[in-house]
Image: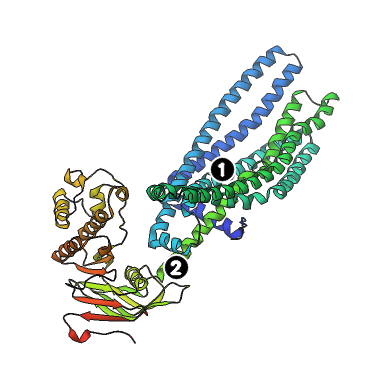
Amino acid sequence: MPDKKPAVTREILRRLRRVVWAFLRSKRVRARAWLLLAGLLILMLVISGMNVLNSYVGRDFFSSIERRDSAGFVRYAWRYVAVFAASTLVATLFRFCEERLGLLWREWQTQRVVRGYLNQHIYLHIKQTGSISNPDQRMTDDIRALTTTSLSFLLMILNGTFTAISFSGVLWSISPVLFGVAVLYAAVGSGLTFWLGRPLIRLNYQQSDREADFRSELIYVHQNAEGLAFTRDEARMKERLGARIDQLVFNYRKIVAVNRNLNFFTGGYNYMIQLIPALFVAPMFIAGGVEFGVIGQSTMAFATLVGAFSLVVTQFQSISSYASVVTRLSELVDASENAALRNSRSCLDCSIDGDQVVYSKLCLKASEKDERLLLRDLDATLEPKRNVLITGPNPAAKTSLFHATAGLHEAGSGSIRRPPPEKLAFVLEQPYLPPGSLRELLTPPGAPALADQEILSLFNELGLDLEGARNGDFDTPQRWDDELSLTEGQLLAVARALLGKPDFIFLDHLDAALDGEEFRRVRDVIARRGVAAIVFGNGKTSDSGYDAVLEVAADGSWKWRDRNIPSAEGKGTA
């Protein structure tokens, strides 16, 4: 894949302004945000004033030394201490407010992005399309960097403005020529720094991905530790990890090389700041035109003014990292917007209507890019309390139909009418059991906590014997994927689905994880609760006990056999 070359474009800056404005207008946090921001501006003005005062106190302090004035030395020394103490207090309060405002912004921004990421299955669409890499890192490291660095840069720009205004007068009063040299020196230094360091923007962007890829491989090793050990596949994994390490090290070497060239220039640039004012003011002191303390004051004023004008020089490495962060988050926003648009088409003209699941002229393709027709012109109705087996030698078609019924497959045409989402439950072939306590796992969203007896009663019906339930422990958090066998996980997933009181429960290859007796017991429990079981079989499932069978052929044609309507036998497409 070719290297991407992010840049801070007008569009990115526009989005950044939109994010900042949305934060400051948020009903939940805007009062605290504006209060902290106002406090920062006030403290910044105070700091700027203290710095100017410090330059004059320092001038008089060193002038008293030059005059051998003991009384003046003591007097100005105490003033020096007082100014330093006050400056320390104000700077500490300023830093505290900055960190609190940065934390508030990060909390608000992270919650906003996470809610959007989970909304409308955006996370699923991003994974399926592979439109962006490492979205987890973009929502953690990149948001942290965006909020703290944006705030830091904003405050540096404001502080630089106040400082430039304050010290321009000081330096002009000492020497107008020195003031002009300061402005010219900063302008030339900023231009050369940008020219030397520009490759860092692209390299920092790539480094973020390299680091995230390496971390993803390590997470994979942790999640698949047993499989890796049993198959003795360590050699292959070492090669993969070694390749990831080589990639991030190679890219980082490029960063180090650019930093080396940049540091050669910025190091000399910063050293000359200390010398230049002395070259202009020392002859004036020797000629008797100024006091000795003016040399120190001019050095401080020159360094402060050049620093205010030289943010590009002093902060370029941070700016280059910041540019990559803004680009990566902009890509996440783009991917989320595209996923939301894609999600609006993902249900194949779905509608919530009635208490049946009705497929009308439903055609399913493999994907948007793969035009293979998996299912052709399906017309079928799934009715409450009637069990249906979906079988046949076409696993891809069955999987697509399972996803399309849930509203998660958009490639195709036709329509699906469904009951409200809470009336449908889906149990995957690999059960989804999020971490948490047993009670949290089984209690439907928004419902009151389930009673112990209700859980135990259903477990007994299903033949599910979990140690925690047996010991009356329903509230200790567990990682269920690590604790349960596949059979136990499937039965627990069925229990979770049934406790939501759906009208339809769709079972994806449940007969592959359970033996014949366990599978019959599950179907009996579902039937006793008046729920229609829609079973996606593995091709070898017996059709005994079902009210209807939908058989999908390899070419996408289908047959619907209804035991109560003999005339429906053999119905299908040409």
| In the image, residue 47 above or below residue 257 | above
Q: Residue at x 26, y 63 (%)?
A: 510
**Residue occupied by mark 2:** 341
Q: Position of residue 141 (x, y in %)?
A: 50, 47
**Residue occupied by mark 1:** 152
Q: Label 2 crowding class (10 Å Cα cut-off): few <14, some 14-19, many 20+?
A: few
Q: Label 1 crowding class (10 Å Cα cut-off): few <14, some 14-19, many 20+?
A: some
* Location of residue 300 by image quarter: top right
Secondary structure beneath dot 1 equals: helix
Q: At label 2, which amino acid type do we have? A: Leu
* Location of residue 394 by image quarter: bottom left
Q: At label 1, which amino acid type do we have? A: Ser
| In the image, residue 397 above or below residue 24 | below
Q: Position of residue 191 (x, y in %)?
A: 73, 48
- Quadrant for the N terminus in the image: bottom right
Q: Nearer the viewer, residue 153 or 253?
A: 253
Q: Nearer the viewer, residue 45 or 435?
A: 435
- Quadrant for the C terminus in the image: bottom left
Q: CA distance from mark 2 to mark 1?
A: 35 Å
Q: Residue at x 14, y 57 (%)?
A: 461
Looking at the image, the residue that sits furthest to the top is: 70
Image-based side of 21 in relation to 562, left or right = right
Secondary structure beneath dot 2 equals: helix
On the question of residue 298 being in view, the answer is yes
Mark toward the start of the polypeptide (2 vs 1): 1
Q: Nearer the viewer, residue 103 or 391?
A: 391
Q: Position of residue 207 (x, y in %)?
A: 58, 49
Q: Nearer the viewer, residue 466 or 123?
A: 466
Image-based side of 185 in relation to 413, left or right = right
Q: Residue at x 38, y 63 (%)?
A: 120
